[in-house]
Amino acid sequence: MDIVTAFLQTPVHWVVSKSDPKVSPLPCLPGWALVNPLVQSPIQDARGTCISTPEGDYLLSCQSISFCTEQDALPLGIHELEAFLVRLKYRSGQALLQPHVLAHGRLSLDALPEQEAAAESINATPLKYVRLTSITQDVITQAALNDQGSEAPVHALLLLEAIEAITHRDLKKAVLFSAIAVEVLAQTQIRDAYERLKLSSPNPSEMRFIDVQPKKGTTTIREDPVFELLMGRAKGQAERLFHEVALYVLGRSMHTEDLSLYELNTKLRDMRNRIAHKDLKGKSSKLCLEDATLALDCANRTFRWFNAEDYPLPEEVAQVSGKPSQTSKFL
Protein backbone atom coordinates (compact mmCIF):
# COMPACT_ATOMS: atom_id res chain seq x y z
CA MET A 1 0.00 0.00 0.00
CA ASP A 2 1.34 3.41 -1.01
CA ILE A 3 0.66 6.40 1.25
CA VAL A 4 0.91 10.04 0.20
CA THR A 5 0.71 12.70 2.92
CA ALA A 6 0.43 16.39 2.04
CA PHE A 7 1.41 19.09 4.52
CA LEU A 8 -0.68 22.21 4.26
CA GLN A 9 -0.34 25.94 4.81
CA THR A 10 -3.33 26.15 7.17
CA PRO A 11 -5.15 23.70 9.45
CA VAL A 12 -8.12 21.74 8.16
CA HIS A 13 -11.12 21.12 10.43
CA TRP A 14 -12.88 17.75 10.39
CA VAL A 15 -15.83 16.20 12.18
CA VAL A 16 -15.38 12.42 12.31
CA SER A 17 -17.78 9.89 13.77
CA LYS A 18 -16.91 6.44 15.04
CA SER A 19 -18.82 4.86 12.16
CA ASP A 20 -16.81 6.63 9.44
CA PRO A 21 -14.69 4.27 7.31
CA LYS A 22 -10.92 4.15 7.63
CA VAL A 23 -10.55 5.10 3.96
CA SER A 24 -12.94 6.79 1.49
CA PRO A 25 -12.54 5.93 -2.21
CA LEU A 26 -12.15 8.95 -4.48
CA PRO A 27 -13.69 8.46 -7.95
CA CYS A 28 -12.21 11.83 -8.98
CA LEU A 29 -8.73 10.37 -8.29
CA PRO A 30 -9.03 6.82 -9.70
CA GLY A 31 -7.36 4.20 -7.54
CA TRP A 32 -6.85 6.53 -4.58
CA ALA A 33 -8.69 6.84 -1.28
CA LEU A 34 -8.71 9.51 1.44
CA VAL A 35 -7.41 8.30 4.79
CA ASN A 36 -9.61 9.01 7.81
CA PRO A 37 -7.87 11.82 9.75
CA LEU A 38 -8.21 9.79 12.96
CA VAL A 39 -5.52 7.52 11.53
CA GLN A 40 -2.15 8.84 12.59
CA SER A 41 -0.01 9.95 9.66
CA PRO A 42 2.58 7.23 9.04
CA ILE A 43 5.07 9.86 7.89
CA GLN A 44 4.75 12.32 10.72
CA ASP A 45 2.41 12.93 13.64
CA ALA A 46 0.71 15.97 12.16
CA ARG A 47 -2.85 15.31 13.25
CA GLY A 48 -2.96 18.32 15.52
CA THR A 49 -5.75 18.73 18.04
CA CYS A 50 -8.53 16.21 18.58
CA ILE A 51 -11.45 16.69 20.93
CA SER A 52 -14.59 14.68 21.54
CA THR A 53 -17.84 16.61 21.33
CA PRO A 54 -21.00 16.17 23.43
CA GLU A 55 -22.62 14.59 20.34
CA GLY A 56 -20.07 11.77 20.42
CA ASP A 57 -18.13 12.89 17.37
CA TYR A 58 -14.50 13.94 17.10
CA LEU A 59 -13.52 17.43 16.06
CA LEU A 60 -10.04 17.47 14.57
CA SER A 61 -7.76 20.22 13.41
CA CYS A 62 -4.66 19.18 11.48
CA GLN A 63 -2.26 20.51 8.89
CA SER A 64 -1.88 17.32 6.90
CA ILE A 65 -4.03 15.08 4.75
CA SER A 66 -3.22 11.53 3.65
CA PHE A 67 -4.20 9.39 0.67
CA CYS A 68 -3.60 5.70 0.01
CA THR A 69 -3.70 3.27 -2.90
CA GLU A 70 -3.36 -0.47 -3.25
CA GLN A 71 -3.42 -0.31 -7.04
CA ASP A 72 -1.05 0.79 -9.74
CA ALA A 73 -2.69 4.22 -9.71
CA LEU A 74 -1.34 7.33 -11.35
CA PRO A 75 0.97 9.32 -9.02
CA LEU A 76 -0.51 12.12 -6.95
CA GLY A 77 1.31 15.37 -7.58
CA ILE A 78 0.84 18.79 -6.02
CA HIS A 79 -1.64 19.79 -8.74
CA GLU A 80 -3.94 16.83 -8.04
CA LEU A 81 -3.65 17.31 -4.28
CA GLU A 82 -4.48 21.00 -4.43
CA ALA A 83 -7.36 20.44 -6.86
CA PHE A 84 -8.96 18.02 -4.38
CA LEU A 85 -8.43 20.48 -1.53
CA VAL A 86 -10.33 23.10 -3.56
CA ARG A 87 -13.21 20.63 -3.84
CA LEU A 88 -13.20 20.11 -0.06
CA LYS A 89 -13.14 23.86 0.53
CA TYR A 90 -16.07 24.43 -1.83
CA ARG A 91 -18.20 21.60 -0.43
CA SER A 92 -17.54 22.39 3.24
CA GLY A 93 -17.55 26.19 3.06
CA GLN A 94 -14.34 26.24 5.10
CA ALA A 95 -13.16 29.67 3.98
CA LEU A 96 -9.86 29.59 5.88
CA LEU A 97 -8.76 26.34 4.25
CA GLN A 98 -5.86 27.28 2.01
CA PRO A 99 -5.51 24.69 -0.79
CA HIS A 100 -1.75 25.08 -0.93
CA VAL A 101 0.55 22.11 -0.36
CA LEU A 102 3.82 23.08 1.31
CA ALA A 103 5.35 19.61 0.94
CA HIS A 104 4.31 16.02 0.44
CA GLY A 105 5.88 12.66 1.13
CA ARG A 106 5.34 9.10 0.01
CA LEU A 107 6.09 5.67 1.49
CA SER A 108 4.88 2.07 1.33
CA LEU A 109 3.22 0.15 4.16
CA ASP A 110 1.75 -3.31 4.52
CA ALA A 111 -1.36 -1.81 6.14
CA LEU A 112 -2.64 1.43 7.61
CA PRO A 113 -2.24 2.05 11.34
CA GLU A 114 -5.35 1.62 13.47
CA GLN A 115 -7.66 4.57 14.03
CA GLU A 116 -6.87 6.40 17.23
CA ALA A 117 -9.87 7.86 19.01
CA ALA A 118 -8.05 9.11 22.10
CA ALA A 119 -9.18 12.68 22.47
CA GLU A 120 -9.63 15.40 25.02
CA SER A 121 -13.23 15.50 26.17
CA ILE A 122 -14.97 18.87 26.39
CA ASN A 123 -18.34 19.90 27.74
CA ALA A 124 -18.68 23.07 25.73
CA THR A 125 -20.02 23.02 22.18
CA PRO A 126 -17.30 23.93 19.64
CA LEU A 127 -17.59 27.22 17.80
CA LYS A 128 -20.65 27.09 15.58
CA TYR A 129 -18.74 28.23 12.48
CA VAL A 130 -16.04 25.58 12.92
CA ARG A 131 -18.66 22.89 13.34
CA LEU A 132 -20.75 24.08 10.39
CA THR A 133 -17.80 24.18 8.01
CA SER A 134 -15.86 21.13 9.15
CA ILE A 135 -15.28 18.37 6.62
CA THR A 136 -17.61 15.43 7.22
CA GLN A 137 -18.08 12.10 5.50
CA ASP A 138 -20.88 13.61 3.42
CA VAL A 139 -18.57 16.43 2.28
CA ILE A 140 -15.91 13.90 1.27
CA THR A 141 -18.45 11.89 -0.71
CA GLN A 142 -19.64 14.97 -2.61
CA ALA A 143 -16.13 16.26 -3.26
CA ALA A 144 -14.98 12.85 -4.52
CA LEU A 145 -17.56 12.56 -7.31
CA ASN A 146 -16.07 12.29 -10.76
CA ASP A 147 -18.42 14.63 -12.61
CA GLN A 148 -18.42 18.23 -13.78
CA GLY A 149 -20.92 19.27 -11.11
CA SER A 150 -18.39 18.47 -8.38
CA GLU A 151 -15.96 21.14 -9.58
CA ALA A 152 -15.98 24.34 -7.55
CA PRO A 153 -17.69 27.17 -9.47
CA VAL A 154 -15.84 30.46 -9.66
CA HIS A 155 -18.55 32.45 -7.88
CA ALA A 156 -18.43 30.10 -4.86
CA LEU A 157 -14.66 30.40 -4.54
CA LEU A 158 -14.90 34.20 -4.82
CA LEU A 159 -17.44 34.29 -1.98
CA LEU A 160 -15.19 32.08 0.17
CA GLU A 161 -12.29 34.45 -0.56
CA ALA A 162 -14.45 37.35 0.62
CA ILE A 163 -15.28 35.51 3.86
CA GLU A 164 -11.62 34.74 4.44
CA ALA A 165 -10.73 38.38 3.80
CA ILE A 166 -13.16 39.72 6.40
CA THR A 167 -11.81 37.33 9.06
CA HIS A 168 -8.39 38.89 8.44
CA ARG A 169 -10.01 42.37 8.43
CA ASP A 170 -9.06 42.94 4.81
CA LEU A 171 -12.26 44.92 4.35
CA LYS A 172 -11.53 46.21 0.86
CA LYS A 173 -10.95 42.70 -0.50
CA ALA A 174 -14.08 41.45 1.27
CA VAL A 175 -16.22 44.10 -0.44
CA LEU A 176 -14.60 43.72 -3.85
CA PHE A 177 -14.82 39.92 -3.89
CA SER A 178 -18.41 40.00 -2.64
CA ALA A 179 -19.37 42.32 -5.51
CA ILE A 180 -17.50 40.26 -8.09
CA ALA A 181 -18.99 37.01 -6.73
CA VAL A 182 -22.61 38.15 -7.17
CA GLU A 183 -21.96 39.45 -10.67
CA VAL A 184 -20.20 36.25 -11.77
CA LEU A 185 -23.00 34.21 -10.17
CA ALA A 186 -25.71 36.15 -12.00
CA GLN A 187 -23.91 35.94 -15.34
CA THR A 188 -23.29 32.21 -14.92
CA GLN A 189 -26.82 31.31 -13.85
CA ILE A 190 -28.44 33.42 -16.57
CA ARG A 191 -26.08 32.26 -19.32
CA ASP A 192 -26.54 28.59 -18.33
CA ALA A 193 -30.33 29.00 -18.36
CA TYR A 194 -30.11 30.73 -21.76
CA GLU A 195 -28.08 27.84 -23.23
CA ARG A 196 -30.61 25.32 -21.94
CA LEU A 197 -33.45 27.28 -23.53
CA LYS A 198 -31.53 27.49 -26.80
CA LEU A 199 -31.16 23.70 -26.89
CA SER A 200 -34.81 23.06 -26.01
CA SER A 201 -37.17 21.94 -28.74
CA PRO A 202 -39.22 23.83 -29.52
CA ASN A 203 -37.66 27.06 -28.26
CA PRO A 204 -39.91 28.90 -25.78
CA SER A 205 -42.20 31.38 -27.50
CA GLU A 206 -41.23 34.22 -25.15
CA MET A 207 -37.63 34.10 -26.44
CA ARG A 208 -36.53 35.40 -29.85
CA PHE A 209 -34.16 32.73 -31.17
CA ILE A 210 -33.13 33.04 -34.80
CA ASP A 211 -30.43 31.54 -37.01
CA VAL A 212 -27.74 34.12 -37.71
CA GLN A 213 -24.81 34.03 -40.12
CA PRO A 214 -22.06 36.11 -38.44
CA LYS A 215 -20.26 36.72 -41.74
CA LYS A 216 -20.87 35.77 -45.33
CA GLY A 217 -19.74 32.24 -45.97
CA THR A 218 -19.66 31.27 -42.28
CA THR A 219 -21.80 28.68 -40.52
CA THR A 220 -25.06 29.94 -39.09
CA ILE A 221 -25.49 30.01 -35.31
CA ARG A 222 -28.63 30.15 -33.22
CA GLU A 223 -28.97 33.11 -30.90
CA ASP A 224 -31.43 35.52 -29.36
CA PRO A 225 -30.40 39.08 -30.31
CA VAL A 226 -32.67 40.54 -27.62
CA PHE A 227 -30.81 38.56 -24.96
CA GLU A 228 -27.42 39.61 -26.33
CA LEU A 229 -28.55 43.25 -26.33
CA LEU A 230 -29.70 43.03 -22.72
CA MET A 231 -26.44 41.36 -21.66
CA GLY A 232 -24.46 44.08 -23.42
CA ARG A 233 -26.38 46.79 -21.57
CA ALA A 234 -25.73 45.00 -18.27
CA LYS A 235 -21.95 45.42 -18.57
CA GLY A 236 -20.88 47.75 -15.79
CA GLN A 237 -24.45 47.81 -14.45
CA ALA A 238 -24.83 44.50 -12.65
CA GLU A 239 -28.27 45.44 -11.31
CA ARG A 240 -29.63 45.02 -14.86
CA LEU A 241 -28.75 41.33 -14.57
CA PHE A 242 -31.03 41.07 -11.55
CA HIS A 243 -33.97 42.84 -13.21
CA GLU A 244 -34.29 43.03 -16.99
CA VAL A 245 -32.05 40.12 -17.98
CA ALA A 246 -33.23 37.79 -15.20
CA LEU A 247 -36.86 38.62 -16.03
CA TYR A 248 -36.32 37.87 -19.72
CA VAL A 249 -34.46 34.56 -19.23
CA LEU A 250 -35.53 33.25 -15.82
CA GLY A 251 -38.99 34.78 -15.67
CA ARG A 252 -38.06 36.38 -12.33
CA SER A 253 -36.96 39.86 -11.31
CA MET A 254 -35.17 40.69 -8.08
CA HIS A 255 -36.52 44.22 -8.44
CA THR A 256 -40.09 42.97 -8.07
CA GLU A 257 -39.47 40.00 -5.74
CA ASP A 258 -37.02 41.58 -3.28
CA LEU A 259 -36.60 45.31 -3.81
CA SER A 260 -34.41 45.78 -0.71
CA LEU A 261 -31.93 43.17 -1.98
CA TYR A 262 -31.96 44.76 -5.44
CA GLU A 263 -31.15 48.17 -3.93
CA LEU A 264 -28.44 46.62 -1.76
CA ASN A 265 -26.82 45.13 -4.86
CA THR A 266 -26.90 48.54 -6.53
CA LYS A 267 -25.13 50.06 -3.52
CA LEU A 268 -22.62 47.21 -3.51
CA ARG A 269 -21.79 47.87 -7.16
CA ASP A 270 -21.37 51.59 -6.46
CA MET A 271 -19.08 50.85 -3.51
CA ARG A 272 -16.98 48.47 -5.61
CA ASN A 273 -16.61 51.13 -8.30
CA ARG A 274 -15.61 53.79 -5.78
CA ILE A 275 -12.95 51.50 -4.31
CA ALA A 276 -11.59 50.64 -7.76
CA HIS A 277 -11.48 54.26 -8.90
CA LYS A 278 -9.73 55.43 -5.73
CA ASP A 279 -7.14 52.69 -6.10
CA LEU A 280 -6.45 53.78 -9.68
CA LYS A 281 -5.88 57.33 -8.42
CA GLY A 282 -3.58 56.13 -5.65
CA LYS A 283 -6.04 56.98 -2.92
CA SER A 284 -7.08 54.66 -0.09
CA SER A 285 -10.66 53.62 0.62
CA LYS A 286 -11.78 53.95 4.23
CA LEU A 287 -14.19 51.15 5.05
CA CYS A 288 -15.67 49.96 8.32
CA LEU A 289 -16.47 46.41 9.38
CA GLU A 290 -20.18 47.01 8.80
CA ASP A 291 -19.45 47.76 5.13
CA ALA A 292 -17.79 44.40 4.59
CA THR A 293 -20.41 42.56 6.65
CA LEU A 294 -23.26 44.08 4.67
CA ALA A 295 -21.44 43.27 1.42
CA LEU A 296 -21.18 39.62 2.47
CA ASP A 297 -24.79 39.56 3.63
CA CYS A 298 -25.82 40.97 0.26
CA ALA A 299 -23.78 38.29 -1.51
CA ASN A 300 -25.24 35.45 0.56
CA ARG A 301 -28.80 36.70 0.06
CA THR A 302 -28.17 37.00 -3.68
CA PHE A 303 -26.80 33.45 -3.79
CA ARG A 304 -29.99 32.25 -2.11
CA TRP A 305 -32.14 34.24 -4.56
CA PHE A 306 -30.47 32.38 -7.43
CA ASN A 307 -30.86 29.07 -5.53
CA ALA A 308 -27.09 28.76 -5.21
CA GLU A 309 -25.35 27.52 -2.07
CA ASP A 310 -24.39 30.29 0.34
CA TYR A 311 -21.91 30.05 3.21
CA PRO A 312 -22.04 30.82 6.95
CA LEU A 313 -20.00 33.64 8.43
CA PRO A 314 -17.71 33.34 11.47
CA GLU A 315 -19.40 34.30 14.73
CA GLU A 316 -17.42 37.50 15.23
CA VAL A 317 -18.55 38.68 11.80
CA ALA A 318 -22.14 37.45 11.95
CA GLN A 319 -22.69 39.27 15.24
CA VAL A 320 -21.98 42.66 13.68
CA SER A 321 -25.19 44.64 13.45
CA GLY A 322 -26.97 44.43 10.11
CA LYS A 323 -27.64 48.17 10.26
CA PRO A 324 -24.90 50.40 8.84
CA SER A 325 -23.14 52.76 11.21
CA GLN A 326 -22.67 56.46 10.60
CA THR A 327 -19.30 55.71 8.93
CA SER A 328 -20.70 53.05 6.61
CA LYS A 329 -20.45 53.59 2.85
CA PHE A 330 -23.81 51.82 2.53
CA LEU A 331 -25.64 54.87 3.88
Image (cartoon, rainbow, N blue to C red):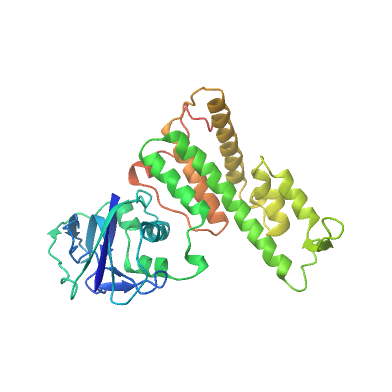
Among all residues in the image, which is located at the extreme right? 216
List x then y, in percent, for residue 238: 64, 44
Is residue 11 in sight in this rendering? no
- The correct choice, above or below, for 185 with respect to 145 in the image is above
Which residue occupies 68% across, 43% down? 235
Of 180 and 261, the residue lying toward us:
180
Number of marks: 0
The quadrant of the picture occupied by the C terminus is top right
List x then y, in percent, for residue 269: 59, 38
- The correct choice, above or below, for 291 with respect to 138 in the image is above
The quadrant of the picture occupied by the N terminus is bottom left
Of 136 and 292, the residue lying toward us:
136
Question: In the image, is 265 to the left or to the right of 108?
Answer: right
- The correct choice, above or below, for 9 with respect to 135 in the image is above
Is residue 288 in sight in this rendering? yes
Question: In the image, is 191 to the left or to the right of 95?
Answer: right
Which residue occupies 48% across, 45% down? 297
Which residue occupies 25% across, 57% down? 64
Question: In the image, is 221 to the left or to the right of 23?
Answer: right
List x then y, in percent, for residue 101: 32, 52
Quadrant in which residue 234 is drawn: top right
List x then y, in percent, for residue 30: 39, 73
Quadrant in which residue 36 is drawn: bottom left
- The correct choice, above or below, for 89 with respect to 299 in the image is below
